[in-house]
Image (cartoon, grey):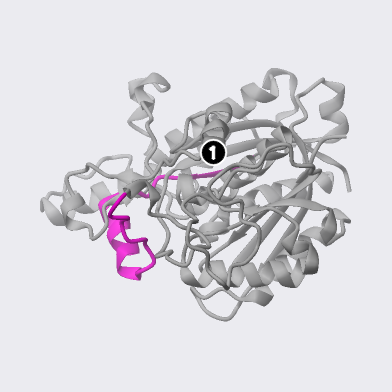
């Protein structure tokens, strides 16, 4: 198995549209969650989410923009950031040895929503001619491949909330196994449409709006947590074979060293301790690491009653006494739940935490839940933390659990 370096990071998020701003806001404990101001908000029970401020016209010419759903706009911009960060010129690359693996849960939600509104709401047959090409789940990955003429493998993974963690893990496998040398991997999601928000509302997993402060509505691991808050955005990393990256003098942000994949296979929405623990153990096994070597876990930490208690128990099951000595935090408390892009954004946050030796906080955790009794770094970031390795957990409806482990480059 070949070593795999993370040489580029690109981010579009509710907390900023590049890595430095994103991480600075995490460390300051700023929340990207707010009340929405769309015209449909009066029809929502809790009109809160974590939207991205993104001016697509700055980045794409009008003819191209007409073919890009918001989810593809995010993905392309984040991918271009990551490629620029890695200092790659594809003119000098073997494009057959480079590919794109992307995760998304909802695909082109805005295009789908607009199309249904036209057909059913306006009783019109004038649907946008590119609707299929904009809405299809693999559009974002396809556009990245087209933009850079990459003719290696191009795959889209859709495993709900673990989609982008799976995409990164599977891309790691392709490089480690020698099939490719370079992969653009991550996820993108743009689900803040009326139809999607109403569907999630019907599932009764969304948080109630905090009456004192809407930005504090997502409260992972707290006694008074009431559910998740949807967010949007994209996170992309460039993965390269280690020796190749070193030879060309690429930035070495981290080494991706472990990946674990398991399935609950018990209930479509209910997580299991066994499934989550299995994914963490498999990640440790693939990394060749002991549990005690992990210095930080970026938890899935959705803020739902079921997930937070189960994830806490699974961490205890895997890490034993070390579970109480290791910082664990949920950055979803600030950027919300990006569904298919969540794993990639949180993996990027884990890498940035390793680089800065600073653990982002779990915000809005003021009322402790006795069942959730680990060190969740409540309310304030922790600096000067001695850590070499970080774990990023991603667990999903449907039962697909994916765990990634990154270490500081050596």
- Answer with the quarter of the image where residue 111 lies: top left
Residue 85 visible in the snapshot: yes
Is residue 383 located in the magenta-colored stretch of the structure?
Answer: no
Range of residues picked out in magenta: 185-212
Residue 148 in view of the camera: no
**Above-or-below relation of 81 to 405:** above
Q: Residue at x 85, y 26 (%)?
A: 246
Give percent across and percent down for residue 324.
Answer: 73, 62
Residue at 63% from the left image edge and 32% from the top image edge: 9
Q: Pick whichever, 50 or 137, lies toward us.
A: 50
Image position, residue 134 (x, y; %): 38, 42
Q: Is residue 287 above or below residue 225?
A: above
Of residues 179 and 129, which is closer to you in this image?
179
List the single residue furthest toward the front: 367
Residue at x 74% of width, y 32% of height: 253
In the displayed structure image, the side of residue 220 where residue 241 appears, left or right: right
Q: Is residue 195 magenta?
A: yes
Q: Which residue is mark 1?
A: 26
Q: Quadrant of residue 277?
A: bottom right
Q: Secondary structure at mark 1?
A: helix
Left or right, 341 with respect to 315, comes to left
* Quadrant of the snapshot with the C terminus: top right
* Residue 49 left/right relative to 188: left
**Label 1 neighbourhood size at 10 Å, few (<14), some (14-19), many (20+)?**
many
């Amino acid at each position: 198995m070949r070593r795999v370096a993370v040489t580029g990071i690109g981010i579009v998020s509710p907390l900023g549209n590049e890595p430095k701003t994103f991480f600075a806001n995490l460390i300051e404990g700023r929340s990207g969650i707010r009340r929405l101001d769309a015209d449909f908000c009066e029809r929502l029970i809790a009109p809160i989410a974590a939207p991205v401020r993104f001016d697509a016209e700055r980045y794409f010419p009008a003819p191209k923009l007409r073919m890009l759903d918001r989810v593809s706009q995010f993905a392309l911009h984040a991918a271009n950031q990551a490629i620029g960060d890695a200092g790659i010129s594809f003119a000098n690359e073997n494009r057959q040895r480079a590919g794109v693996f992307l995760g998304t849960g909802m695909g082109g939600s805005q295009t789908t929503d607009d199309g249904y509104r036209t057909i059913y709401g306006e009783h019109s047959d004038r649907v946008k001619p590119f609707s299929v090409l904009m809405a299809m789940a693999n559009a974002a990955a396809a556009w990245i491949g087209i933009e850079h003429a990459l003719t290696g493998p191009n795959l889209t993974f859709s495993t709900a909330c673990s989609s982008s963690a799976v995409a990164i893990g599977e891309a790691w496998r392709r490089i480690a196994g020698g099939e490719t040398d370079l992969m653009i991997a991550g996820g993108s999601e743009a689900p803040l449409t009326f139809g999607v928000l109403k569907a999630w509302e019907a599932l009764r997993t969304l948080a109630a709006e905090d009456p004192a402060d809407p930005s504090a509505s997502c409260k992972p691991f707290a006694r008074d947590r009431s559910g998740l808050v949807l967010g949007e955005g994209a996170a992309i990393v460039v993965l390269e074979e280690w020796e190749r990256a070193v030879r060309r003098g690429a930035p070495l942000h981290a080494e991706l060293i472990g990946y674990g994949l398991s399935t609950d296979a018990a209930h479509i929405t209910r997580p299991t301790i066994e499934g989550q623990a299995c994914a963490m153990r498999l990640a440790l096994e693939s990394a060749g690491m002991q549990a005690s070597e992990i210095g930080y876990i970026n938890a899935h930490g959705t803020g739902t009653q079921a997930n937070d208690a189960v994830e806490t128990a699974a961490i205890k099951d895997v890490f034993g006494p070390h579970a109480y000595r290791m910082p664990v935090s949920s950055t979803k408390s600030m950027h919300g739940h990006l569904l298919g892009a969540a794993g990639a954004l949180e993996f990027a946050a884990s890498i940035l935490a390793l680089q800065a030796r600073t653990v982002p906080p779990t915000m809005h955790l003021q009322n402790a839940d006795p069942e959730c009794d680990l060190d969740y770094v409540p309310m304030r970031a922790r600096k000067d933390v001695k850590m070499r390795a970080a774990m990023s957990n991603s667990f999903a409806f449907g039962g697909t659990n994916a765990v990634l482990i990154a270490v500081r480059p050596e």
